[in-house]
Amino acid sequence: MAEIDTIAKQFIHTYPADFARFALQRDDVENVRILNTEQTRAQSRRTDSLLRVDLDGQRVLVHHEFQTTDSTPPMPRRMAGYLGYLIEYYGLPVYAHVLYLRPTAGRRDPGFYRQAHPDYPIGIGYKVIRLSQLDGRAVLDGAYLGLLPFAPLMQPPAGLAADQWLYQCVEQIETAPLAKEAKAQFMVGLTILSGLVYDYPTIETIVPEEVMYESSVVQHFAERALKQGIEQGIEQTLRENVQEALAIRFELAESDPLAARIGAIDDVPRLKQLHRAAIEVPSLEAFTDLLDADE
């Protein structure tokens, strides 16, 4: 989910020390620096966040990977690739973490990659952090300001209903010592992240709309949603045009498997070509052959 990635990276890059202290569960984190994870050689191994910090007088890397779903390929294999590259490239100890934001994700992640061949053993470990299993009070009490938007994904105090917990998280942002724009950014982050565990009617009744819509982040997502809507509208129109031409010329039924294949195409240039072909081909078999050739 692109929105979740954008929000998570925005806050960890704005409050890197908070995330490092949270993941490590230590306060003696010093000289935190955000490292570029998009080097040319590392394009296929781009990590969500990589921090260089000083810990106990030693320089180390703190790696965060955010997940909302189970990974394909499996996370142990992905992390083995990430960590092997980081060790090779930086030559520093790596403290790696996978943060699962959705409660249903990562339940089977063992936190390590292991090749158990007796002659060629390989072992790479990392820490699995499932936010749904963590007590959110430390975040709400101000220990990790940058993680406030993530607090609704954590466990509320015993006896507190989920909607009441979300209300407390919103209230904490409203009273936090933040500038107006930063407060709006926090509220937007909370709103988007909360959608992983709360239904939107609940969110809409709790999050102040006037605060949320002051944020440039909302404008960004609104503009992107509009663009996506326009693109999807064009694709849908083209798909309908192709199917209509085939229905008129060759009596293609809506239930025909060929109609379902056309309905799955989302490439605009290809749909334009298929529309022209639907008008010009001499038979339905010829159109099917053309579709097969393109796949």
Image: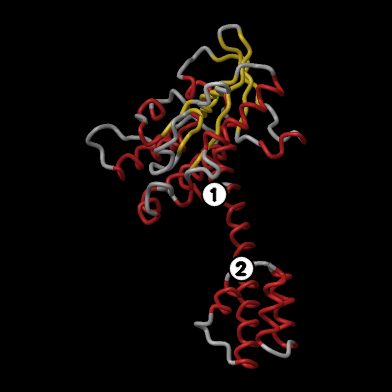
Location of residue 94 by image quarter: top right
Q: Is residue 5 left or right of residue 190?
A: right
Depicted 231 relative to depicted 97: above or below: below
**Does 11 sit above or below residue 102?**
above
Q: CA distance from mark 2 to mark 1?
A: 17 Å
- Residue at horizontal 54%, vertical 23%? 123
**Residue 211's mark?**
none
Residue 74: x and y, percent? 52, 40
What residue is rendered at 41% in x and 35% in y?
A: 151
x%, y% of residue 235?
A: 64, 71
Instruction: Check residue 1 in the rendering and tell me which mark sits there, or answer none.
Output: 1
Quadrant position of the C terminus in the picture: bottom right
Which residue shows up at 61% across the image and 20% down it?
61
Q: Residue furthest left?
A: 159
Nearest the viewer among 114 and 255 is: 114
Q: Which amino acid lies under the numbered mark 1 shown in the image of this protein? A: Met
Dot 2 crowding, Cα within 10 Å, few <14, some 14–19, many 20+ = some
Query: Where is residue 236 shown, x and y percent of the image?
Result: 60, 74
Residue placed furthest toward the right: 40
Q: Find numbered disc 1 in the image and state the secondary structure of the residue it sits on.
A: loop
Residue under the point 58% across and 73% down: 261
Q: Which residue is mark 2?
A: 232
